[in-house]
Amino acid sequence: MAANDTIADMLTRIRNANLARHQTVDIPSTKMTRSIAQVLKEEGFIADFTEADEGIACHLVLTLKYRGKARDPIIKNLKRVSRPGLRVYSNRKELPRVLGGIGIAIISTSSGIMTDRDARRQGIGGEVLCYVW
């Protein structure tokens, strides 16, 4: 599958795995998906991620987190903001707050992929990739 929007593909895979209550989900590995997975791990939305090599194709295996006996997904929602057809940029003064700070916005900055909180702390803006809460 040649998806030119690897981020939307990644978010959709996580969303579907969450709905089906899967423990892990496979995502094609790119620099971008690795960075996003790293942010999700640091922010406590996923338990862990590993990289699996299968010949030429390399993919990430994300371990999802659930709450309690009912296995309530930690990630309630993922929303793609900037997309190939419509890029969304935000300067440091206009960085979005997701649900008043409960969720995170993942921003692609000149210093790499980070949360809206980190970008605000460093005083830099960038492309708003997605919201996670």
Image (cartoon, rainbow, N blue to C red):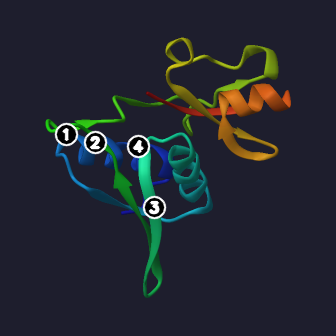
For mark 1, give the secondary structure: loop
Q: Is residue 125 visible?
A: no
**Labels 3 and 4 touching (C-beta < 8 A):** no
Q: For marks 3 and 2, give the one nearer the viewer.
A: 2
Could you tell me how far apart the alpha carbons at marks 1 and 4 are, in whole angstroms? 20 Å
Give, as a three-letter code, the residue at label 4. Answer: Leu
For mark 4, give the secondary structure: helix
Question: How would you rate the neighbour count of disc 3 (Cα within 10 Å): few for under 14, some for 14-19, many for 20 or more?
Answer: some
Tell which circle, 3 or 2, labels the residue nearer the N-terminal end. Answer: 3
Tell which circle, 2 or 4, labels the residue nearer the N-terminal end. Answer: 4
**Labels 2 and 4 touching (C-beta < 8 A):** no
Image x and y of residue 129, in percent: 58, 36
Image x and y of residue 36, in percent: 56, 48
Give, as a three-letter code, the residue at label 1. Answer: Arg
Q: For marks 1 and 4, give the one nearer the viewer.
A: 1
- Please give the residue where the numbered disc 1 appears in the rendered image: 71
Q: For marks 1 and 3, give the one nearer the viewer.
A: 1
Could you tell me how far apart the alpha carbons at marks 1 and 3 are, in whole angstroms? 19 Å
- Please give the residue where the numbered disc 3 appears in the rendered image: 49
- Please give the residue where the numbered disc 4 appears in the rendered image: 11
Could you tell me how far apart the alpha carbons at marks 3 and 4 are, in whole angstroms? 15 Å
Give, as a three-letter code, the residue at label 2. Answer: Tyr
Determine which quarter of the picture holds residue 49: bottom left
Residue displayed at 44% across by 43% down = 8
Could you tell me how far apart the alpha carbons at marks 2 and 1 are, in whole angstroms? 5 Å
Q: Which mark is residue 66?
A: 2
